[in-house]
Image (cartoon, rainbow, N blue to C red):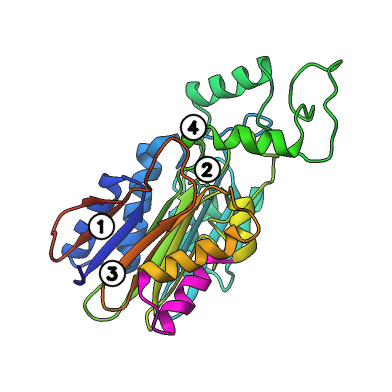
Amino acid sequence: HASLPLVINTWPFKNATAAAWSALQSGGSVLDAVERGCARCEMEQCDGSVGYGGSPDESGETTLDALIMNGDTMEVGAVADLRRIKNAIGVARAVMEHTEHTLLVGESASVFAENMGFIAEDLTTNKSVNIFSEWLKGSCQPNYRKNVSPDPSKSCGPYRPKATWKQSKRARHANIHAHDTIGMIALDRDGHAAAGTSTNGLTHKVPGRVGDSPIVGAGAYVDSLAGGAAATGDGDVMMRFLPSYLAVELMRAGVDPSAACKSAISRIKRHYSEFFGAIICANTTGHYGAACNKVPGLTKFHFMVANSETNTPVLKS
Ligand code: SD4
C-alpha cells in the first residue's frame, strides 16, 4: 500500500483528508495540505473536539492547541491555550513563518493572531454552554485535579474538585467524544513532508492545561528523511513519552511504520496500561501504519488515507 503523494490523518475525518488531498492535487505544498486539512476540521468542529464550541474547560471556555511542522527544515509553529481565534492551525503556521519562535501560548498567542489579521470571536456555542452548565449542575465529573478530597458540603462548580484522580480517569475514558484531535501527515513525490495537529483539548480541563497536540515530538513529528507521526488520545499521559518523536526515530532506523507505531504505544503502556490513545505513522516511501491502546466505545481505531492509489479519502482501521 505504498504510494506517494500521501495524506494520512487520525479518525474518520474524511472532509479534512479531502481538503488536504485537493490542496496537493492543485499544486499546494505539503504544508498547505496539512494546514487546509486541519483547518477544515476546525471549521466543521470535527466530533466537537476540534475547533470552537467544544471541550469547555472548568470555567466554561474553549481554548485551542495546534501545531504544524515542516519536515524539510524542521521548523515548527505551535499555539497552545489559544483563545478567541478559530483557525488555530493557521495561527500555528503564522508562528512558524513570521517569527523565530516555536510555541506561543494563551492570551499573548491570541494577541499575536489578531495582529496577524486573524479574527477574534467568541469560541463559545450553545453546545459548549450546555456541556458546561450540565457539568456545573451535575457531579462535576470528570475533573482533573488530584490529591484533593471531595467536599460534599460544596456545590459543584469550577475549582470545587469532587473526584479523586483515579475516578476522574475512569470517567474520561467513558466518553469517546472527549478525545478526537486531528493529527495529519502529508508527503509528496519530491520528498517533502509535513505534519500537524489541531484540537480543543479535554472537556472540563483545568484552565491553562495544554495537551500533547501542540508539543513537538508528542502530538506530531516529521522529518523528510525519516517519516512522520501524529498522536491522539490522553495527552496528559502521552506527552510524557514523546510518542511521535519515538516513532519517527524508529522509522529512521528502518522499522516499518506499523511496528514503529506499535512500539511508541507499547512504551506508554509499560507505565499506563489503560491509557487511551493512538498514533499514525508514515515513512518516506509512502508506507503507513497505525496503532492504538484503548479506544473507548470502539473496537478499532479508525484513520483516513488518501494516496495516488486511492485518489480519494479511504477509511482504514
Ligand atoms: C489532548 N490529545 O489534548 C488531545 C486530545 C485528543 O483525540 O487527542 N483527542 O490531550
Does the residue at mark 2 contact the one at mark 4 (Cβ under 8 Å)?
no
Circle on res. 200: 2
Disc 1 target residue: 305
Tell whether position 243 is magenta. Answer: yes
What residue is drawn where x is 65% and y is 39%?
169
**In this orientation, does residue 117 appear?**
no
| Side of 26 relative to 54 (left or right) | left
Looking at the rendered structure, the kind of residue marked 2 is Asn
Asked if ligand 1 lies within 8 A of label 2, the reply is yes
* Viewer-side label of 2, 3: 2
**Who comes first in sequence, dot 1 or dot 3?**
3
Q: Which residue is under mark 3?
A: 29
Boundaries of the magenta span: 242-257
Mark before the other along the chain sequence, 4 or 1: 4
Label 4 Cα crowd, 10 Å radius (few <14 / some 14-19 / many 20+): many
Q: Position of residue 254 (x, y in %)?
A: 39, 83
Q: Would you say residue 282 is visible in this rendering?
A: yes
Task: Identify the mark at residue 53; answer none if there is no mark.
Answer: 4
Element class at badge 2: loop
Q: Quadrant of residue 195?
A: bottom left
Q: Nearer the viewer, residue 101 or 207?
A: 207
